Image (cartoon, grey):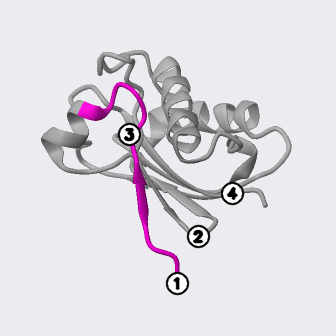
Amino acid sequence: MSSAQFFNYPGTETNAEQYHYSQAVKIGNTVRTSGQGGWDEKGNVEPDLERQIGLTFDNILKALKAVDSRLSLDDVYAIRSYHLDIDTSFNTMTTQFREQFPNHRPIWTCIQIGKLGLEGMQVEIEVEASIPV
């Protein structure tokens, strides 16, 4: 069995130190991200839902590329999304899926919860991806 390797991308080092976690882990050819949100390089959460989800996918890509520069959203096969209000965010999320994953349909678990990790977050997404061989 391969040992776990942990990764962060630029701009997340403070959270890594302060909260003692990593943005991604690689075990063998599998990569999993921690929950990503719609924050900018300074850690500010975007208040607009559509832009927040777009930034979340940007951050997912940054986390994947921190592990292996060959990775892209095309390599994502599983998604878990956590929503403060599914009724508000579901259609926006599926629209983003069509844009972000035009060539395949990853498996998806969608969950409504009461609170997310950072103030202002409306959605948090974690993914699993397979490193191309």
Q: Earlier in the sequence, mark 1 or mark 3?
A: 1
The secondary structure type at the circle numbered 4 is loop
**What is the x, y in percent for residue 63?**
50, 40
Q: Are marks 2 and 4 in contact (CB under 8 Å)?
A: no
User: Residue at label 1?
Assistant: 1
Q: Residues within 10 Å of mark 2 (few under 14, many from 20)?
A: few
Mark 1 vs mark 3: in front:
1
Q: Residues within 10 Å of mark 1 (few under 14, many from 20)?
A: few
Number of the label disc, if any, that sits on residue 28: 2
User: Mark 2 is on which residue type?
Assistant: Gly
User: Mark 3 is on which residue type?
Assistant: Asp
Query: Which residue is painted at 82% across and 38% down in the image?
Result: 102
Q: Is residue 101 left or right of residue 11?
A: right
How far is disc 3 from disc 4 in space, using C-alphas? 33 Å
Q: Is residue 5 magenta?
A: yes
Q: Earlier in the sequence, mark 1 or mark 2?
A: 1
Q: Residues within 10 Å of mark 4 (few under 14, many from 20)?
A: some
Look at the picture and state if 19 lies above or below 132: above
User: Mark 1 is on which residue type?
Assistant: Met
The secondary structure type at the circle numbered 1 is loop
How far is disc 1 from disc 3 in space, using C-alphas? 39 Å
How far is disc 1 from disc 4 in space, using C-alphas? 16 Å
User: Residue at label 4?
Assistant: 131
Q: Earlier in the sequence, mark 3 or mark 4?
A: 3
User: Residue at label 3?
Assistant: 85
How far is disc 1 from disc 2 in space, using C-alphas? 8 Å
Q: Quadrant of residue 17?
A: top left
